[in-house]
Amino acid sequence: MRKYFLILSLIIVAHNSFGQVVVDSSLLLSQKDIQWWKGAKFGLFIHFGLYSVLGQGEWAMFERRMDTSEYGKLKDSFTVSKFSGKNWVDVAKQAGCKYMVVTSRHHDGFSLFNTSFGNYNSMNTPAKKDLIKEYVDAAHNAGMKVGIYYSPLDWRYPGFFFPDLYYSNALEMKKQTYTQVRELLSNYGKIDILWYDGGEDSWLGFAGLMWDGGKGWYTRGMDKPYRGKFSWEPIKLNTMVRELQPKVVINPRSGWMGDFNTQEVRLRGRENRPWELCTNLSNAAWGWTPSAKDNMMTLDSCIRLLVAVVCQDGNLLLNVGPKADGEIEPAQVQRLKEMGDFLSKYGESIYNTRGGVWDANWGGTTFTDNEIYVHVLRVPTNGRIILPSVSKKITSVKYLGTNVNVGFKQSEGDIVLDGISNKENKTDIILKATLK
Ligand code: GLC
């Protein structure tokens, strides 16, 4: 019966932002096991690799059509003299992040860990380090939840670009993925999040360069996923993952639906399953570029974004790309600290809450069993906000962290909050309604 079900579910595909995914709920974590992740709300994403040495973003090798062996020489300058796993974790901690996701290997194929698959990794550089080990150990010590980013896609393999033509090469690439995912989930203790990137069929062959006598050259298009004989077999891959780390939270970019949905850069808003927005602290590439420090989001926009995400019941994964030497830009560290200051004051209205209402005109709410937090990002001119009714009785409404009351009227139909003001000119005025 189960086998029959599996075959059925394998042919069901759904669209997500990055193409199509296999829907199979038998691998999903239980509500209980994903609860910590949903309550965590804010994570630090780190993109680091050989591309950081070049400083042109993590797509440089592909975009500039660099010869793979020329690009590979960057390995000789990979000294990461200022890298410290502990430091990265400290930065995340000070920012108020409850989890991290670090690139163990991006699309260029260079691994930041000790792998048995080839020697294109950080152990074979002047650094002679397993950066992932240092990061994971530091995170474990600090009680920080550990996420690992892994790209099955690898530009060094012609089999990625033409999976049928170079089929055995594509199989080699697949073997690399299975071997390395196994290593990452076996050699470092508990891993809390596995964050794939580029493992969906729509990415195979980069949407497919094809030749047809009649039409000439054409591309298949992202909406028409690759349908050739190669398959990543995402159910098989993630069954292995669940055997190695039963509770790991998995994202949807392996071709299987995953435990949550991802939104990238553009906030699309509430979804009917757990979801996360990943975006960059700087308006630049994910990997380091010299302009990153000059194009940072203001503190005001960081707070607004986090609040918009959390009121819509999502998580925010905010990225920085450390410099070639492994150090995170001091300006970015500073901005993250400011986020941490905000969260250390007002974190009770963010962490472990659920998203309530969202209204782009003024803001939204988060709630727990006994509190509603109203995040006012723009005070309406009449100082009044009307919320949907709740069954419990409101005993008080105060500006969070103060004893100052806010006028409220609770009726069967709604809750009216009155006289809201922003004397201190805050980005987010938070009102706390206590329920009984
Ligand atoms: C995209 C990009 C990649 C980046 C990722 C972050 O898939 O290919 O460079 O790492 O998004 O979400």
Image (tube, rainbow, N blue to C red):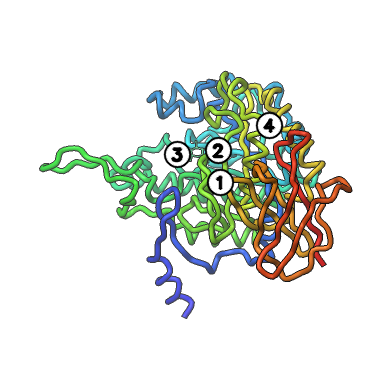
Residue 348 position within the rendered picture, expressed as x and y whole percent measured from the top left:
79, 50
- Residue 119's quadrant in the figure? top right
Are discs 2 and 1 less than 8 Å apart at CB? yes
Residue 105 badge: 2
Q: Which of marks 3 and 4 is in front?
A: 4
Disc 1 and disc 4: Cα gap in Å? Answer: 38 Å
Q: What residue type is labelled 2?
A: Arg
Residue 383 badge: none
Q: Name the residue under label 4.
A: 299
Q: Can residue 164 be seen in this view?
A: yes
Disc 2 and disc 1: Cα gap in Å? Answer: 10 Å
Looking at the image, which residue is at 57% across and 53% down? 275
Q: Nearer the viewer, mark 1 or mark 4?
A: 4
Q: Nearer the viewer, residue 252 or 339?
A: 339
Outermost residue on the front side: it is 382
Element under disc 1? helix
Disc 4 and disc 2: Cα gap in Å? Answer: 30 Å
Q: Mark 1 points at which residue?
A: 180
| Number of marks | 4
Q: Earlier in the sequence, mark 1 or mark 3?
A: 3
Outermost residue on the left side: it is 214
